[in-house]
Amino acid sequence: MAAVRHDRGVDDRWAAAGLGLDYGVVALRRTTDEWVTVGSALRERVATVLAGDGRVEQIGSSSVVGLLAKPIIDLAFGLVAGDDLGHITSALAADGWVYRGDAGDSGGHVFVLDSRPQHRVAHLHAVDLGGTQWVNYLRLRDLLRSNPTARQAYEDVKVRLAAQHPDDREAYTEGKTDVVTTLLATVV
């Protein structure tokens, strides 16, 4: 396991903002402006670590102020043709990110960042820049930011799933697939 590189400024903000969740646990909190600010700092940190090898965006519920979300920052990294995944993995590992494998159409190449053992603070999904996953991450984020009806529909499903699967993050995540598909079908 790679040693976690701590950036005191960002690390202190994680704790102060109430970000982080023990592995496997599902708990929802309202996304705050501070989460978005911390996510932006983390996005810039990843962009710096990868030296401009692609594009990084904050995605997911933790980027939508007021929406219930797991207190984990979600980022997407857009891979461009010719990117060396080994180089990207090594650079991220030096910054404390742990490669969790290729989730394929369920999230691309997944990297996680823990603030302490088994306490997740961020996910990074490396997917093809401009590909279906990339586009859908941004479309969903933008829809949730702009459409109160979509936000409420998504939140209702998340609350139900969190109650059903409080200790099974995989089941919780998988359970959101239908509502995400439905919401994305409404975006033109």
Image (tube, rainbow, N blue to C red):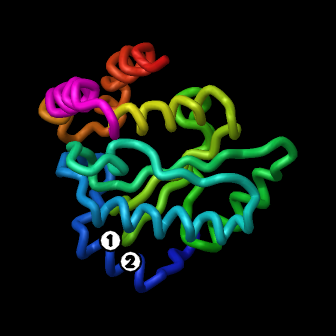
> Can residue 12 be seen from the camera position used here?
yes
Q: Position of residue 123 (x, y in %)?
A: 47, 52
Position of 81 relative to 133 (above/below): below
How many numbered dots are placed on residues in this image? 2
Q: Nearer the viewer, residue 112 or 126?
A: 126
Label 2, on which residue?
11
Label 1, on which residue?
14
Q: Position of residue 109 (x, y in %)?
A: 62, 43
Residue in view at x 56 percent, y 60 percent: 98
Using a 10 Å C-alpha cutoff, classify the residue at mark 2 as few (fewer than 14 neighbours), some (14 to 19) or many (20 or more). Answer: some
Q: In the rendered structure, does residue 100 fall within the stretch colored magenta?
A: no
Amino acid residing under circle 2 = Asp
Is 122 left, or right, of 145 in this rendering?
right
Q: Secondary structure at mark 1?
A: helix
Quadrant location, the N terminus? bottom right
Q: Are marks 1 and 2 in contact (CB under 8 Å)?
A: yes
Is 158 left, or right, of 174 in this rendering?
left
Start-end of magenta stretch = 145-160
> Can residue 161 be seen from the camera position used here?
no
Q: Nearer the viewer, residue 134 or 86?
A: 134
Q: Position of residue 48 (x, y in %)?
A: 65, 71
How far apart are labels 1 and 2 at the CA level?
A: 5 Å
Residue in view at x 27 percent, y 51 percent: 65
